[in-house]
Image (tube, rainbow, N blue to C red):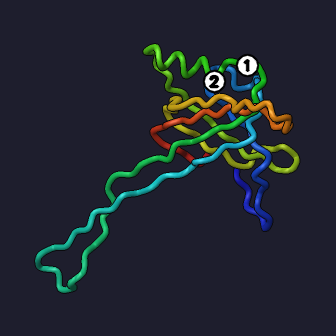
Amino acid sequence: MATQRNNPYGAFNFLVSLGNGSETSVIAGFSDASGLGSEINYSEYRNGNDMVNTVRKVANTFKQEDVTLKRGLIGSTDLFQWVKDVREGGDGRRTVTITVLDEARNPVAAFKLTNAQPKKWVGPTLAAKGGGEVAMEELHLVHEGVEYV
């Protein structure tokens, strides 16, 4: 899917599939998707008979960053319902896919989150000061791995 080119792809053209069985139906577009990343932990190790007085770095466990999705409040309760289902004891694990699109809206890269579950839902900040801001909601996801597909 990914095609190498001289100019980087824009970060403003992407799709998010929440893995709820309706991957072709888009209820609302997300304005932000952040936190794609992982971190590898290393242990220091040195044999007692090593000739060099330095330690080796040995990879061991790794951890995944939480992913945050933001979108304008549109009256759909799908994100809140997902959080509520997990809060009430349901199995909320899903495969969430974030697909980057090129200028012609063709998929060029995708990041697949394995066993993603909602961690936190944040509703809009409401203020009657007449600023014209958009009411936004956030969904924070935990997951067990990210694949670049």
- Residue 86 is left or right of residue 139, and the answer is left
Residue visible at 42% across and 48% down in the picture: 63
Q: Nearer the viewer, residue 75 or 141?
A: 75
Residue 116 in the image: x percent, y percent?
52, 32
Residue 110: x, y in percent? 66, 44
The amino acid sitting under disc 1 is: Ser
In front here: 51 or 26?
26
Q: In this rendering, does residue 26 appear at all?
A: no
Label 1 crowd bin: few (<14), some (14–19), many (20+), radius 10 Å: few
Mark 1 secondary-structure assignment = loop
Res. 1 visible in picture: yes
Q: Residue at x 75, y 25 (%)?
A: 24
Q: Give residue 10's mark.
A: none
Q: Are marks 1 and 2 in contact (CB under 8 Å)?
A: yes
Residue 76: assigned label: 1
- Residue type, numbered disc 2: Leu
Residue 134 against residue 13 in the figure, above or below = above
Query: Going by the picture, which residue comes out furthest to the front?
Result: 129
Count numbered badges in the picture: 2
Q: Residues within 10 Å of mark 2 (few under 14, many from 20)?
A: some
The residue at 70%/53% (across/down) is 2
Q: Which residue is mark 2?
A: 79
How far apart marks 1 and 2 lie (CA) works out to 8 Å
For this view, does 93 lie left or right of residue 13?
left
Q: Position of residue 118 (x, y in %)?
A: 53, 29
Q: Is residue 127 left or right of residue 41?
A: right
Task: Return the x and y of residue 60 as percentages of the image width and height.
Answer: 32, 56
Q: Tell me if residue 95 comes above or below residue 91 in the rendering.
A: below
Looking at the rendered structure, the secondary structure element under dot 2 is helix
